[in-house]
Image (tube, helix red, strand yellow):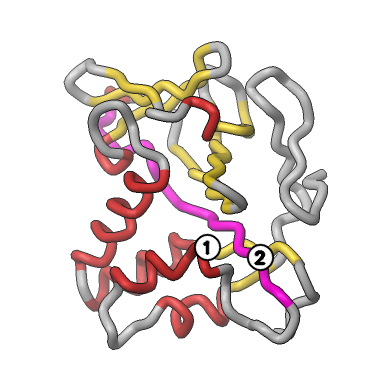
Amino acid sequence: MQPANGASYWVDMNRLLGRLEEREAPARQAILQQLDALFPLKSGSHGEVCEYLVYYHQLLALFADGSSSGLQQSGQLVALTGSREKPSSLLLKAGDLHIELEVDSSGCENGARALQNLQIEARVDEGDCQPHTALAAIDTLLDSTLTLADALSPRLHRPRSDRSFRTPGGEDYLTQNRQLV
């Protein structure tokens, strides 16, 4: 696939995580650590969250022990799909990098982890088939036998056209170079 100059593509990390689990379980943990580094909670880890909700304009992460936490930088939550009480996905932003957290909003009662999948928006520039350099940090965490570029090259795809994000305040949210409709 030869991407257009400056186009936004999304990387489906669920497919990558499944492939990594077959080879090396620590790679999944490394990706979750990178998520925690980019979007740190005031306490706890995204990998331990059993439910997310949006309280006013703030992300609230709920844990199985009854505790809760917000993002250290509350402005990193830029949009969501679903309702604020039961979001189906959360769009976080660090610099020019968007990460969509697809979440299970069934609650903490079933003991499941809320984070089901990650979609990473990667800007692809002219003559470069690799994801944006912001993803290089994740690449360094992976086993050298499966580089991020190798794992992601067949998984780069255009954002789903049926996805419609809105801000916590209810307005439509646009990502870089693309209106999500």
Check disc 2 and report its element: helix, strand or loop: strand
Q: Nearer the viewer, mark 2 or mark 1?
A: 2
Q: Position of residue 41 (x, y in %)?
A: 33, 32
Front-most of residues 105 and 66: 66
Q: Is residue 36 visible?
A: yes
What amino acid does circle 1 point to?
Answer: Asp
Q: Is residue 109 left or right of residue 93?
A: left
Question: In which quadrant of the rendered image does the C terminus lie?
Answer: top right
- Seen in the picture, residue 113 relative to 126 is either above or below; the reply is above
**Mark 2 burial class by Cα count in 10 Å: few <14, some 14-19, many 20+:** many
Say which mark, if any, is on residue 104: none
Span colored in magenta? 110-125
Query: Could you tell me the amino acid type at mark 2?
Result: Arg
Task: Give the number of marks.
Answer: 2
- The residue at which mark 1 appears reads as 12
Q: Position of residue 62 (x, y in %)?
A: 32, 23
Cα separation, mark 2 vs mark 1, equals 14 Å
Q: Residue at x 47, y 65 (%)?
A: 135
Q: Nearer the viewer, residue 125 or 16?
A: 125
